[in-house]
Amino acid sequence: MISNPISNGIVGEVNIPGDKSISHRSIIIPSISNGICEITNILKSDDVMHTLNAFRKMGVKIEENDKKIIIYGHGLNSLKKPEEDLYLGNSGTSARLLTGLLSSQKFDSILTGDKSLSKRPMERISEPLKKLNGKIETSNGTMPLFIKGSNLIANNIDLKIPSAQIKSGILLASLNATGQTKIIENKITRDHTETMLKSFGANIDIQIVENKKQLKITGQKELVSKNINVPNDLSSSAFFIVSALINKNSHIKLKNINNNPTRNGIVLALKKMGAKLVFSNERENNNEKICDIEVASSDLHGCELGPEFADLMIDEYPILSIAASFASSPSIFRGLKELRVKESDRLKLILTNLTNCGVKCKNENDDLIIYPSDKYHIKKNIIQTDFDHRIAMAFAVMGTKIGPLSINDSESISTSFPNFKNEINRLGGNIS
């Protein structure tokens, strides 16, 4: 994929797909609930479809049409042993959430993934599950995962790694455990799982104590299905927001965007940088905060973000680094250790690709420092992505400003935003 500079800005109303995190959970939780769940606006990306196909292989009846997915759930213990390994592609969310869920089932299962997912650390979910009597074997700390279904016993889990995926895997395991599991989250992460579980009737208590989140969940209570309308994805919106901010004569509108306060760090950071963002029609849907956003071209300035921002927006640092490249002063983003263990070593790729685009930047420990310039001279126009969708989209946005840039492995974008290229071109982009 080639991303070229544009001249007339990004203009119009953007069609953003459904939230990826909520879409995964909109398949998982109804599949182990009692009743029929109709899901509208689900993201039909590669990652989400791997989750859906996994549950089909476990005997869940799922119907699809253009506008809805309908799931017929039959309770916590209704899943069937799959006849083959469950292949999850590039989806770390699927891998870690299903590891937790399947650890409490009455059958054994094997989870596999593509080359990229098979490099990602999985002991971070298998080890805490062992405290609940889970029996999971990794392959030298990575996938494939071999899960032996077990009778889980509640325990107290103190989460050392700030990860919504790990927390969610433990929550899903705890649903079927004997007794009450207490999870202590030292750094608060996105809360889509506990929000949806609560709306489906789980016996869950959530409190904030001394800036730590405590979740108490009593297992073996059946869930009751309800319909889900998935809001649009803020992470996907970020690429269009930054495109509009850095390109002159831009003005866009985004509707029905999820503005969950546990993951809206990107808008807080951009506002801190002077971005012209207007929020309207703020409301709630299924306990999730929703809003519309209007964006206009802006003169950005640099900012310093502490490590607490990483807990709110770890996925958005690739596109935030593009915004920082066109600010009027340097930016420092601290505490980005988790960027090294995402779909790729994102911190390394951000540094490599920014440098190739002529941006002066450096890494000190786990901090990223970017020194913007008035004009960039591309040193190498080949963007290395290591099949990471967020790196690919971020540097496609970079190309709209300084291009042309050739984005390697751009097909990775289908994992989260299959229509990205068409949508940005419809609004005035120049990607081929």
Image (cartoon, rainbow, N blue to C red):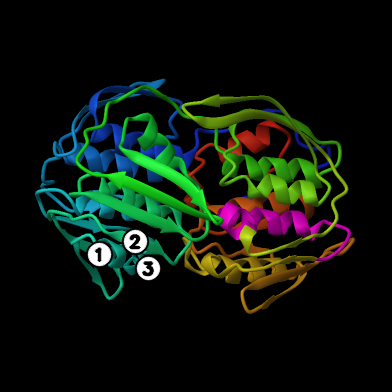
- Where 159 falls versus 296 (above or below)? below
The part of the image, by quadrant, that contains residue 96 is: bottom left
Location of residue 210 in the rendering, given as x and y in whole percent from the top left corner: 55, 57
- Decide: few, some or many residues near mark 3? Use Cα within 10 Å; few <14, some 14-19, many ≥20: some
Q: Amino acid at mark 2?
A: Ile
377 left or right of 321 in image: right
355 left or right of 185 in image: right
88 left or right of 189 in image: left
Between 320 and 7, the one lying in front of the other is 320
The residue under label 1 is 131
Q: Is residue 15 visible?
A: no
Distance of label 2 from label 3 (alpha carbons)? 19 Å
Between 85 and 154, the one lying in front of the other is 154
Distance of label 3 from label 1 (alpha carbons)? 18 Å
**Considering only order in the chain, which callout, 1 or 2, is on the residue closer to the N terminus?**
1
Q: Could you say whether the residue bearing mark 1 is in a helix, strand or loop?
A: loop
Q: Which residues are magenta?
A: 309-330
Location of residue 139 in the rendering, given as x and y in whole percent from the top left corner: 25, 72
The residue under label 2 is 157
Q: Could you say whether the residue bearing mark 3 is in a helix, strand or loop?
A: loop
**Considering only order in the chain, which callout, 1 or 3, is on the residue closer to the N terminus?**
3
Location of residue 397 in the rendering, given as x and y in whole percent from the top left corner: 69, 49
Mark nearer the viewer, 3 or 1: 1
| 318 drawn magenta | yes
Q: Residue furthest bottom?
A: 365
